């Protein structure tokens, strides 16, 4: 009988040890799951913060290129270009976007290149191309002959680089965005617009 009682006590002790080991394992799994979900929430929050500063930067770019003023007065546009965005609706600015480079210095829209459009690349029936032909009162009317002239028209294609910096002081998210834009302009303005 003694042997049976001792064996039963050992089995209960062993069962207790096994139960404690399993409790520890389940606790570790629960902690790992909690840590993983916390990490995922942080990653999602960081991605949201980054998307917010990118969206704010895109708003300033769109506001700038919706007007030709950036081509006629780049310094004046850069000095006043600013978008303050409140994403969470608490009444305070979350993201500030300005025309600045990565170092924080003000950047003007910059004309990368300009090219006078040859007459043979224009379509006389296209309403967008019609201002590029000279008037009939001028000696050289600018109308393309059958052979197709490569002479310059009254229009030029210009390519611009617009740099904006958007930063969220609360989260530390920031982005510097370069946006290229093409603008058709009068050839006569090239000297003032693209220096």
Image: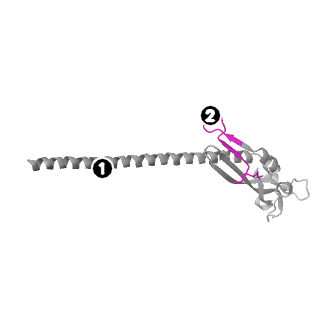
11 or 64, which lies in front? Answer: 11
- Residue, far front: 2
Instruction: Please provide percent x and percent y for residue 128.
Output: 76, 51
User: Disc 2 and disc 1: Cα gap in Å?
Assistant: 49 Å
Q: Quadrant of residue 86?
A: top right
Callout 2–callout 1 Cβ contact below 8 Å:
no
Instruction: Please provide percent x and percent y for residue 100.
Output: 73, 51
Instruction: Please provide percent x and percent y for residue 15.
Output: 22, 48
Q: Specify few, some or many for label 1: CA neighbours under 10 Å numbering under 14, 14-19, or 20 or more.
A: few
- Residue, far bottom: 147
- Residue, far left: 1
The residue located at (63%, 46%) in the rendering is: 53
Q: Which residues are magenta?
A: 83-107
Q: Specify few, some or many for label 2: CA neighbours under 10 Å numbering under 14, 14-19, or 20 or more.
A: few
Secondary structure beneath dot 1 equals helix
Secondary structure beneath dot 2 equals loop
Instruction: Please provide percent x and percent y for residue 155.
Output: 81, 55
Image quarter of the C terminus: bottom right
- Considering only order in the chain, which callout, 1 or 2, is on the residue closer to the N terminus? 1
Mark 2 or 1, closer to the camera? 1
The residue located at (77%, 53%) in the rendering is: 184
Q: Is residue 70 above or below residue 149?
A: above
Query: Could you tell me if residue 68 is visible in this image?
Result: no
The residue carrying mark 2 is 90
Q: Which mark is residue 160?
A: none
The residue located at (71%, 50%) in the rendering is: 164
Q: Is residue 72 left or right of residue 85?
A: right
Can residue 118 be found in the magenta stretch?
no
The residue carrying mark 1 is 21
């Amino acid at each position: 009988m003694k042997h049976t009682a001792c064996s039963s006590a050992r089995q209960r002790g062993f069962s207790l040890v096994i139960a404690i080991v399993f409790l520890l394992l389940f606790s570790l799994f629960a902690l790992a799951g909690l840590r993983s979900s916390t990490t995922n929430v942080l990653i999602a929050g960081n991605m949201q913060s980054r998307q917010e500063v990118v969206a704010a930067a895109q708003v300033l770019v769109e506001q700038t290129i919706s007007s030709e003023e950036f081509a006629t007065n780049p310094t004046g546009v850069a000095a006043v270009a600013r978008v303050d965005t409140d994403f969470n609706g608490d009444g305070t600015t979350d993201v500030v976007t300005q025309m600045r480079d990565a170092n924080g210095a003000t950047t003007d829209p910059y004309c990368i290149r300009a090219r006078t459009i040859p007459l043979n690349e224009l379509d006389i029936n296209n309403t967008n191309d019609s201002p590029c032909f000279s008037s009939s009162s001028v000696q050289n009317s600018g109308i393309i002959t059958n052979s197709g002239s490569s002479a310059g028209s009254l229009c030029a294609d210009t390519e611009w680089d617009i740099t904006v910096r958007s930063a969220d002081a609360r989260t530390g998210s920031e982005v510097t965005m370069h946006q290229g834009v093409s603008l058709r302009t009068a050839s006569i303005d090239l000297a003032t617009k693209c220096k």
